[in-house]
């Protein structure tokens, strides 16, 4: 490909709307453009990387004997009603109605639809099966965020295993777990496998693959001693309940809005030393009380909801809450402090129907006056997992870390096959429920996680396996005949040797070209310039290290190997 022919609209400056490095760099380097919040177009460079990511995932799925399908994205409501998820998916599901008034869903996942295909399996002899697809998922996320990281429309590799029994499921699950480890290693994503809760999927166990990153929305708890690693939700659930905490007579008053950390808040109120006091209740003003937990954790949502009957808000929504309250940042300052993840969680989930999402006016809680109703006047007993606390498996202090969820695998059991009546004949001739697993990787989120992991001040640094092109041949002076001739020769020779090469033949200054090649993140740059040619050499520069070698043009193909 010739750069002069390719649409790579790089931007000189950082786009104002982008915070996360992947968001900023993918926009700047001309990989993506936003259509509306949560919906992005992939430009040619972005499309190439996405294809590489898909290629690696497909390769590893095929290796474990999985078969590729392609299912519709639009589904009849009836199938979702049978599993109860037409209702339980709530506002996250996009719904529409056709001209005959039939209710339809845009698929947010495909358990239901794959399970209906599994109805044609009739005998245990056909098991196990592993089926997968790359298909769009639609989720009406309350808060699309950080470019490709959290969008409303994304490609998922979703696979589904069908086994005769729990042992079979264990095997299919282990195959996926290992395949995922290989996939993330090949993608250059340093993902760690952590125990997780099963959430809306249901089932008995699940493992998330987490890419450590300061911009991650999840918190991973891990033990340097025994290797225990879990999503913080799961770690909290594993703790024994505290039931001997003394309720305080009244809520603590919080009137130091500019305090920066929860430790300072706690110290100021004499609560830090008391490990039994797991939850601090602060009255922010006469109307609004917030429940704050120490440390990085998520709380037991049901418990909080039961204890308080209150709407509970995630810190991710802090800006919206502020906007809705018309509050100054100071008066809700604690909400956004890093490491103070939980304002509360449950009621927002439990009463998700109230939450109509963010728009220009901020958050709308249907029929709820936030300032009045999100008031927790009572003591709430909750366990916390904070950095430095002993935990769950071996009693050693835990460490916590922010991370991006790049993949998630579930042992589903018979939830879906039962609801949809999928059985096969067992060896003894009796009909038996098929046991399922499901396994997801977000393709574009993985792409963003790669950028989060591999970038520097000058731009993206693609790992070779996913780079849009492996080599850029830069003609430093495109108006020089010899430079052009040698550039064309190298371009042809490297392409013939099987490399994906882009020739920067633009009539631009060399500095502009170098800047773009670095921003776009091409792993190797071969620079052909007048001065070098006078000495009989071209330059080979490694993007990741900046290391440059002067080589003879004839040696370029060998040097790039
Ligand atoms: P999250 O907790 O981030 O909302 P999830 O747990 O809802 O994700 P799953 O249902 O487990 O997601 O879906 C499997 C994978 O799909 C996730 O691990 C992630 O890689 C990807 N994914 C989920 N939601 C989104 C989204 N809104 N945008 C991009 N990728 C997503
Ligand atoms: Mg989600
Ligand atoms: Mg999740
Ligand atoms: Mg998940």
Image (cartoon, grey):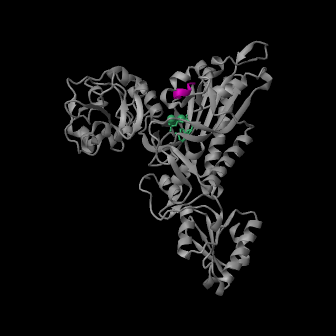
In-image side of 60 versus 12 (left or right): right
Q: Quadrant location of the C terminus? A: bottom right
Name the residue rendered at 47%, 63% in the picture.
457
Task: Where is residue 120? Give x, y as percent.
Answer: 76, 22
- State the residue at coordinates (51%, 30%): 197
In the image, the segment drawn in magenta is: 198-203
Horizontal placement of 280 versus 59: left or right? left
* Rendering coords of residue 523 (x, y %): 61, 63
The residue nearer to you, when weighing 372 against 457, is 372
Q: Residue 493's x, y, as percent?
A: 75, 71
Considering depth in this image, is 17 or 541 the residue closer to the camera?
17
**Is residue 37 positioned above or below 417 on the image?**
below
Please count the marks in the image: 0
Of 377 and 165, the residue lying toward us: 377
Q: Is residue 441 left or right of residue 399?
A: right
**Taking 319 as reference, is 279 above or below it?**
above
């Amino acid at each position: 490909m010739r750069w002069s022919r390719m649409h790579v609209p790089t931007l000189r400056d950082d786009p104002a709307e982008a915070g996360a490095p992947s968001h900023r760099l993918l926009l700047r380097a001309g990989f993506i453009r936003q259509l509306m919040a949560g919906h992005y177009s992939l430009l040619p460079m972005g499309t190439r990387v996405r294809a590489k990511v898909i290629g690696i995932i497909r390769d590893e799925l095929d290796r474990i004997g999985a078969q590729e399908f392609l299912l519709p994205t639009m589904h009849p409501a009836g199938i979702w009603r049978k599993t109860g998820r037409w209702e339980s998916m709530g506002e996250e599901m996009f719904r529409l109605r056709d001209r005959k008034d039939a209710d339809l869903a845009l698929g947010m996942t495909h358990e239901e639809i794959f399970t209906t295909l599994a109805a044609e399996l009739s005998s245990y002899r056909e098991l196990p099966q592993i089926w997968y697809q790359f298909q769009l998922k639609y989720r009406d996320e309350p808060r699309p965020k950080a470019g490709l990281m959290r969008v409303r429309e994304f490609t998922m590799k979703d696979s589904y295993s069908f086994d005769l029994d729990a042992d079979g499921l264990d095997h299919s699950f282990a195959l996926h777990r290992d395949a995922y480890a290989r996939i993330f290693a090949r993608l250059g994503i340093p993902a760690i496998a952590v125990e997780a809760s099963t959430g809306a999927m249901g089932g008995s166990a699940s493992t998330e693959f987490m890419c450590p990153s300061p911009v991650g929305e999840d918190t991973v708890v891990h033990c340097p001693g025994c290797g225990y690693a879990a999503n913080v939700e799961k770690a909290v659930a594993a703790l024994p309940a505290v039931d001997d905490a003394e309720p305080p007579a009244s809520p603590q008053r919080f009137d130091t809005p500019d305090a920066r950390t929860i430790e300072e808040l706690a110290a100021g109120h004499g609560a830090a030393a008391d490990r039994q006091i797991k939850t601090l209740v602060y009255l922010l003003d006469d109307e609004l009380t917030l429940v704050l937990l120490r440390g990085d954790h998520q709380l037991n949502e049901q418990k909080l909801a039961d204890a308080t009957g209150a709407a509970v808000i995630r810190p991710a929504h802090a800006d919206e809450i502020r906007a809705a309250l018309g509050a100054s940042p100071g008066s809700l300052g604690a909400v956004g402090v890093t490491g103070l993840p939980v304002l509360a969680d449950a009621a927002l989930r439990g009463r998700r129907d109230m939450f109509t999402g963010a728009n220009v006016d901020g958050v709308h809680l249907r029929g709820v006056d936030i300032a009045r109703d999100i008031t927790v006047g009572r003591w709430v007993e909750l366990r916390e997992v904070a950095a430095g606390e002993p935990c769950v498996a071996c009693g050693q202090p835990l460490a916590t870390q922010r991370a991006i969820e790049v993949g998630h695998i579930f042992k589903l059991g018979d939830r879906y096959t039962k609801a949809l009546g999928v059985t096969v004949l067992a060896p003894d001739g009796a009909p038996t429920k098929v046991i399922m697993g499901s396994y997801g990787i977000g393709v574009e989120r993985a792409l963003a996680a790669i950028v989060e992991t591999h970038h520097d001040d000058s731009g993206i640094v693609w790992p070779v396996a996913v780079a849009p092109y492996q080599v850029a041949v830069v003609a430093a002076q495109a108006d020089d005949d010899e430079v052009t001739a040698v550039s064309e020769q190298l371009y042809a020779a490297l392409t013939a040797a099987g490399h994906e090469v882009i020739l920067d033949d633009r009539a631009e200054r060399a500095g502009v070209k170098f800047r773009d090649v670095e921003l776009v993140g091409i792993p190797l740059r071969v620079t052909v310039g007048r001065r070098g040619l006078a000495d009989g050499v071209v330059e080979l520069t490694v993007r990741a290290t900046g290391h440059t070698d002067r080589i003879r043009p004839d040696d370029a193909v060998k040097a790039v190997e």
